[in-house]
Amino acid sequence: MKLYLAPMEEITGYVFRNVLWRHFGCVDKYFTPFISPDNRITKKKYGCELLSANNEGMNTVPQLLTNDPALFNDAARTIADMGYEEININFGCPSNTVTGKFKGSGILRAPEMMDRFLDGVFSAHGSVLASYPKMRISLKTRVGYNDETDFDKAAEVLKRYPFSEITIHPRLKKDMYGGKPRMELFDRACGLFGAKIIYNGDIASIQDFNDIVGRYKGKIEGVMIGRGAVKNPAIFRQIRTGKKMTKEELFSFLDDLFEAYKEEYDAGNAAAKLKEVWSYTVGFIQDEKERADIYKMIVKSKGENGYRDASLVARGRIKINSTEGLQ
Ligand SMILES: Cc1cc2nc3c(=O)[nH]c(=O)nc-3n(C[C@H](O)[C@H](O)[C@H](O)COP(=O)(O)O)c2cc1C
């Protein structure tokens, strides 16, 4: 079973990916947060994301978010020149600013536009595949926009294109990240494509992983984990080897992450980044009030010293659940 780190904007950028790789590894592919190629592929933020020096030792897959085949192919050629052999297309982003322009999951309600875009990606003159035949194009998609039947039309289009893999996150756009994954739609989507299917959504423990693998053995190639891996960056190692993360390992990871962000940005920005990560880390705290208190203390901390003090207090207060451990 392949294990992929999900793309998460502002979180799983190259700094996070490197620290996760150094501490725990066991990830088969690391997806970049989406890159919007609308004239920005060469901008500093994206340049850093893709530089080979920032992705050494990792199997990184750049993700592009656009519905414009010319922009896609231009960016894809730049990416291919950098040595990458797979590009992932984002048909999943639910944010209104994105979907309003028929990008991300917004394109799931516009099958004709999707068809024109994918034709430009895979077959038309100017396709990146014409000059880089080894390039693989994979897809990450939701299962519809507003209702459960949207995906039938979209799937008719998607079926015609040779994606190397399709990662399916079984939520509609309107679900955002709430509610439960719509497993009946995943069941339906699973059988539709010739491509290898990757499951994504709400895997936050070994139990969740085992449930998915038990249910879809032989039908899926792998799983992609996002929020569960920000909460527990050792989840991939635990799946592979059974070794749970200790509290020391968690705090060593968080401390290194802070230092790594500091090297790239400044201490203030590094603290802001860590506060975002902590919004997932506090998921380890079972007691609701304790969880809210600790999170509030982290978020309200000021500056580098304030953040460090709050992190030390949190370290003292986080207890390991006797049955779950740090999972
Ligand atoms: C803060 C945040 C940022 C995200 N950014 C991206 C992104 O850049 N590209 C993408 O395809 N999905 C993005 N996603 C969706 C995740 O990749 C994933 O599909 C979703 O979180 C469900 O998986 P999970 O339950 O394992 O987290 C993002 C999700 C969150 C919560």
Image (cartoon, rainbow, N blue to C red):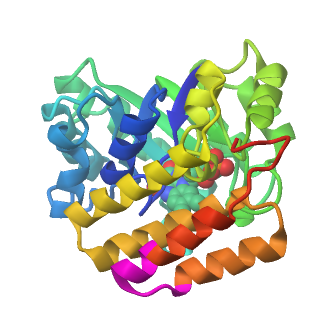
Residue lying at 69% horizontally and 44% vertically, measured from the top left: 326
Q: Farthest residue toward the top? A: 218
Judged left or right of residue 73, residue 223 is right
Does residue 92 appear in the picture of this structure? no
Image quarter of the C terminus: top right
In this view, the residue farthest toward the front is: 316
What secondary structure do most residues of the magenta stretch adopt?
A: helix
Task: Magenta stretch: give its range.
Answer: 300-308
Number of callouts: 0
Q: Position of residue 133 (x, y in %)?
A: 25, 19
Residue at position x 63%, y 82% in the image? 296
Residue at x-position 60% and y-position 82%: 297
**Can residue 28 be seen by looking at this rendering?**
yes
Q: Position of residue 205 (x, y in %)?
A: 73, 40
Residue, x 83% and y 44% (percent of image)?
322
User: Considering depth in this image, is 226 or 283 the residue closer to the camera?
Assistant: 283
The question of residue 269 being in magenta is answered with no
From this view, report whether residue 121 is shown above or below residue 37.
above
**Quadrant containing ligand 1:** bottom right
Image quadrant holding the N terminus, namely top right
> Residue 218, percent across and down?
73, 12
